[in-house]
Amino acid sequence: MSIVEFKKVTKRFGQVTILDEVDLSIEPGEKVVLIGPSGSGKSTLLRCINALEEINGGDLIVDGISVKGSGRMVRLIRQEAGMVFQQFNLFPQMTALQNVAFGPHRVRGETRQEARSQALAMLAKVGLADRVNNYPSELSGGQQQRVAIARALAVKPKLMLFDEPTSALDPELRHEVLRVMQALAEEGMTMIVVTHEMAFARKVGTRLIFMEGGKIAVDGPPRELLENPQNPRLKEFLQHVA
Amino acid sequence: MTFDWSVIWQALPELLKGARLTVLIALAGLAGGLVIGFAAGLARAYGNVVLNAIAFVYVEIIRGTPIIVQVMFIYFALPILADIRINPLAAAIIAIIVNAGAYIAEIVRGTFLSIHKGLREAGLALGLPFWKVLLYIIGPLAFRRMIPALGNQFIVSLKDTSLFIVIGVGELTRQGQEIMAANFRAVEIWSAVAMLYLIMTGVLTLILRVTEKRMRIL
């Protein structure tokens, strides 16, 4: 069964149509890389999956639950679909450890003790065992983003959504975030990634989706599409980002 | 003229009694004002159309009328309209609650809305209900930003209690007025009254400063 299924999903902001009857099925274990020009709807598509954006038409089923369900149903979806943001969005009043322990404790209802030990393990996994007591303002962008990944993983999601996770980072800090993401992919996590990192798409992605004008224009294996793009718009786009 | 200190020593017990009442009215009024202010402020920031409209009308009516008119209305007009009896002290406390509540509502609304919306999304994306996002994430951050503005409001409300002289509450200003009427020592009495207000607002400022220092302002 698909873990994410778009059925003619339409999303509008006022008069502007951002997603135009999008159909898309994503199976567990896939690493989907979403690319496209700005304004093509890729971030919106991602944000519809965990209902940060409300859809205006069609239906969208995530892990068997419709995003159009009650507040409780939407929260169940969000617990299964972790999200990493371009701007990290760490809670500034909490240390790295508190940020990561927050989800297990407040969302999954685990004791402070359990949440803490899981958070420590999670931070060690993203290579930040020595920074657990630092506040976000005391960490570099790359470190902050790794804490943010650990925070999302700590809730034990089945699926991870990445919204341009490296776009706000200096080039030399990107690789540390991409390395963590690659390790996660190798563990078998289902991932949907909006990015401009073509090397990552080629190396880690199992599926590449090129969006244009609120529709999926191209959908296929990354290596093939990146080496030999048939679609003229994709070809042009790749020339610009390369 | 000579400044006669003995006048102040003689008057001090009565003045302190008044100051005690001033503190009581201010504390009770501000405690209530915080509750009303948070409720109205959150309704303005996040409430549906109905809640938002109710809070908006409340804030505009209170901000648009003088507090002295409000307390007159509560003490003299409300008993006629609603057929209830209100003692002066209760009227004074209610006036501070209602008045401070409106201003605190705007402080609450402003600070909550000033918190970056990405943090709200991050909280929601974890699967938390919105009220928990407000309680655990936005609230603590907003509260830190609120302290300077709340401090202002606390001081204003404390001093506003002096207006309740008009309904005969025996607070500090009223006590001063009564002593002055008996001994005609205006300079000594009003100097003492002013000093007592300064001490009260000074203590308040100190408490706020310590609170602010103990928190990481973000």
Image: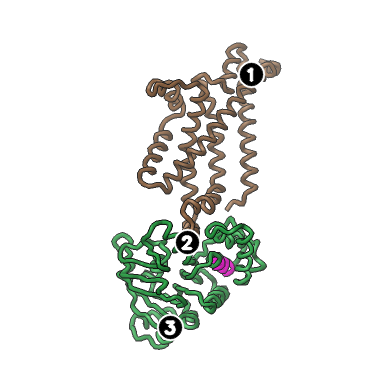
Chain colours: A green, B brown
Q: Residue at x 37, y 60 (%)?
A: A69
Marks 2 and 3 share the same chain: no
Q: Is residue A224 above or below residue A169?
A: below
Q: Dot 3: within a 10 Å radius of its alpha carbon, few (fewer than 14), some, or many (20 or more) residues? A: many
- Residue B40 position, x and y percent, is 44, 41
Q: Dot 1: within a 10 Å radius of its alpha carbon, few (fewer than 14), some, or many (20 or more) residues? A: some
* Disc 1 secondary structure class: helix
- Residue B106 position, x and y percent, is 46, 42
Q: Amino acid at mark 2?
A: Ala
Q: Residue at x 47, y 22 (%)?
A: B86
* Region in magenta: A141-150
Residue B14, label in figure = 1
Q: In the picture, which quadrant includes the N terminus of chain A?
A: bottom left
**Residue A177 in magenta?**
no
Q: Residue furthest left?
A: A15
Between residue A27 and residue A57, name the one nearer to us.
A27
Q: Which residue is mark 2?
A: B125
Q: Which residue is mark 3?
A: A222
* Disc 3 secondary structure class: helix
